[in-house]
Image (cartoon, rainbow, N blue to C red):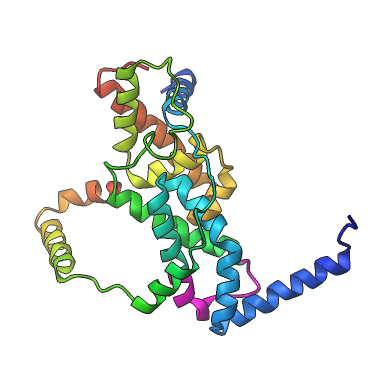
């Protein structure tokens, strides 16, 4: 990719994805913060642990997938 | 209006340091004061990355929840803002990983400023698709560096990486975008 191609790609990206207009918060988040603190730490559902175990097993069986997984992390 | 002199600045600074020290000891009032002071800044930063107001609010809450839990590890001699931004950035990147194909580009935050009308529909769809398919770690750098035009130093600090790594990811993001566009039959 040369400099012209790079500039053109960036220009196209900027033409579609525009900066966010931060209008500020719609209100004070503190009441929600207090509710979140009352809830305490989130528990990881058993299904997520099972899924993680499955991924590890797959990576052990097919180590060729490791670079691809690392790329997408 | 009388300008604030160095004495006033010093007083403000010592007040902030005292607040940070109280927070580090687990004082809830100090945490609330910091929350009130920094919630807008954290929200604005997260919004730039995730581009969804609802998600940005949720992630702001989650950021401060993590901050609250980690109060004992906080070093008051270092700034609160950069620490909060680092935590918020990590959470925002995790969000991008989960919501890879649902990231709103135009529909939500950008409604007030529609994208360049001169861009052909097909081309625009292609760019959106290519952008959505970027891995989160490249997407975050592309959003902050190319779209929001934040400095590489600022991005590096927020993401906890070197400026060199930011430059490299920015280059890889553009290259990946270009490759995706070519694969879609669009020759930029």
User: Residue B10 in magenta?
Assistant: no
Q: Nearer the viewer, residue A18 or A60?
A: A18
Q: Position of residue B175 (x, y in %)?
A: 38, 30
Q: Assign the N terminus of chain B to one quadrant of the image.
A: bottom right
Q: Assign the C terminus of chain B to one quadrant of the image.
A: top left
Q: Is residue A64 above or below residue A57?
A: above
Examine the rendering and report whether any part of residue B162 can be seen: no
- Residue for point 31% across, 50% down: B97
Q: Position of residue B153 (x, y in %)?
A: 59, 48
- Relative placement, left or right, of A73 versus B40 is left
Instruction: Look at the image and give the residue range highlighted in magenta.
Output: B65-79
Q: Is residue B173 above or below residue B80?
A: above
Q: Nearer the viewer, residue B183 or B6?
A: B6
- Residue for point 44% across, 35% down: B110
- Relative placement, left or right, of B170 versus B23 is left
Q: Nearer the viewer, residue B46 or B188?
A: B46
User: Residue B74 in magenta?
Assistant: yes
Q: Position of residue B46 (x, y in %)?
A: 47, 52
Q: Nearer the viewer, residue B82 or B105?
A: B105
The residue lying furthest to the left in this view is A61
- Residue for point 63% across, 80% down: B21
- Relative placement, left or right, of B142 versus B97 is right
Image quarter for residue B60? bottom left
Q: Is residue B8 above or below residue B111?
A: below
- Residue for point 55% across, 37% down: B149
């Amino acid at each position: 990719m040369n400099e012209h191609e790079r500039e053109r790609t960036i220009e196209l990206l900027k033409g579609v994805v525009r900066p966010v207009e931060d209008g500020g918060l719609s209100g004070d988040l503190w009441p929600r913060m207090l509710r979140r603190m009352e809830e305490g730490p989130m528990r990881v559902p058993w299904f997520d642990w099972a899924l993680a175990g499955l991924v590890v097993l797959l990576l052990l069986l097919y180590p060729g997938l490791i670079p691809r997984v690392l790329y997408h992390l | 209006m009388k300008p604030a002199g160095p004495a006033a600045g010093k007083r403000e600074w010592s007040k902030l340091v005292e607040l940070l020290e109280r927070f580090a000891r687990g004082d809830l009032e100090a945490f609330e004061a910091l929350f009130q002071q920094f919630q807008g800044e954290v929200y604005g930063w997260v919004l730039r990355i995730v581009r969804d107001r609802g998600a940005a609010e949720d992630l702001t809450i989650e950021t401060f929840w993590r901050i609250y839990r980690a109060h004992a590890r906080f070093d008051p001699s270092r700034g609160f803002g950069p620490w909060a931004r680092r935590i918020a950035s990590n959470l925002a990147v995790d969000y991008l990983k989960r919501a890879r194909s649902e990231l709103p580009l135009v529909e939500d935050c950008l409604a007030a400023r529609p994208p360049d009308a001169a861009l052909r529909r097909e081309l625009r769809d292609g760019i959106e698709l290519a952008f959505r398919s970027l891995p989160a770690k490249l997407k975050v750098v592309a959003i902050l560096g190319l779209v929001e035009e934040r400095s590489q130093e600022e991005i590096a600090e927020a993401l906890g990486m070197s400026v060199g790594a930011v430059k490299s990811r920015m280059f890889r993001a553009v290259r990946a975008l270009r490759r995706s566009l070519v694969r879609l039959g669009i020759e930029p």
